Image: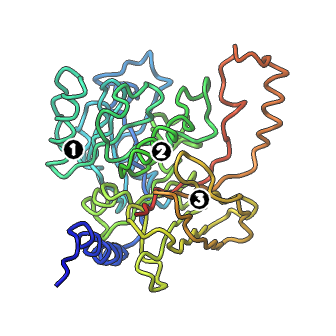
Amino acid sequence: MTRAPLALLLAVALSAALPSAAAAASEGEWIAGDLHVHTTLSHDSYGGPGDDNTGPEDVHTLGYPVAGQFAQAAARGLDYLAITDHEDVRSQADPGFGAGGVIPVPGYESSLKGHAQMLGAGRIYDRGNLSARAVHRMAGALRADGGVFQANHPSDPVWEYGYKFRPDTVEVWNLPWYYQPPFPSAADNDRALRYWQGWLDRGERVGVTGGSDSHWVSTSAAQGAGQPTTWVFARDRSTRGVLEGLRLGRTAVSHQPPGFGGPRLVLKADGDRTGDLEALPGDTVPRGSLFKARVKGAAPGAFLRLVGNGGHALFDPVMVTGPDFTHTFVAPPTVTWIRAELYGEDAGQGRQQGCSTLFGADGSFETTYCTNRIAMLALSSAIYLR
């Protein structure tokens, strides 16, 4: 009897297993939240007389208490909220933690050589000497406790670890996308997007997230809870469900929360060739699979763009023509990952010409308003192809 090569047997087994895993993953629901919110327990958010780390000279940084952030999240239609104060987990003992029926996600923001989100953390972890090896150990300890390690806004401060070790997720969308350097934001979301895609090009599976980085009452109208919103596909409506969905890369980001009519972007694929389109971001499907990108919400006139290896568009952009819009396509045979994005027309060419007129064309005035996309509306994590 002829024996099949081991590699072929493994390939057949993997082909059989992956669609089953994807089908199981489809049992759950998309829930909305914010993974990056601060309270007055952070040193850069004033909490009034008695604040132990911010003084009255910083009254302009007046922030929200824990219950206040959860109340705002509930009012904006969010299902979960992560309180991530700087090197501080006291929020979890606050009576307002999880108020309003919003699922509480514990965590904190850690200052390393760049900032990291310690999602699911119930304690402060040892940062060691801040070397790549020390931070890798720190991330491993968090993961062992069921947490998720995220690289936050990697362009400011610069994530100096580069591609030395893999985060679970990357906060590509920090603050509203139209906040551009040098003001009011120092972080460049387009640069963060390219960093995340670098992981995908290296064959790694890393999810995309967004976070409002909300600190102050004065900026909460445009940069409050859910601006942007991270949608997570969770098997159950719980903290554990949120963390599992993040770990698996089953995410998408919208520029506004559900209560403000933010559009939802859902990318799916038919990995088992049954017509069910059961595969979600984070899953792997065979090359040549049928994909579907669905836009739900107020986005008529926006453009849907499908992106693959190297950040290159796979097809011409497609205009969204209604409040529940679906576009189907077949995966090109050469790509190893596909993601989707939704954007509005933002007069990019006109802005570039205007910047040349105002600031000259020699690049001496550094601003991304001249070149970056301004009207980003939604992003999805990637579906992978074998």
Q: Position of residue 238 (x, y in %)?
A: 28, 64
Q: Which residue is mark 3?
A: 262
Q: Position of residue 378 (x, y in %)?
A: 58, 54
Secondary structure under tag 3 reads loop
Task: Give the vertical position of 123 relative to 381 (above or below).
Answer: above
Q: Position of residue 172 (x, y in %)?
A: 48, 42
Secondary structure under tag 1 reads loop
Residues at marks 1 and 3, CA–CA distance in whole angstroms: 29 Å
Viewer-nearest residue: 284 or 168: 284
Earlier along the polypeptide chain: callout 1 or callout 3? 1
Mark 3 vs mark 2: in front: 2
Q: Residues within 10 Å of mark 2 (few under 14, many from 20)?
A: many
Based on the displayed image, in which of its 4 quarters is residue 160 positioned?
top left
Residues at marks 3 and 2, CA–CA distance in whole angstroms: 24 Å
Based on the displayed image, in which of its 4 quarters is residue 66 positioned?
top left
Secondary structure under tag 2 reads helix
Does 102 sit left or right of 323 as displayed? Answer: left
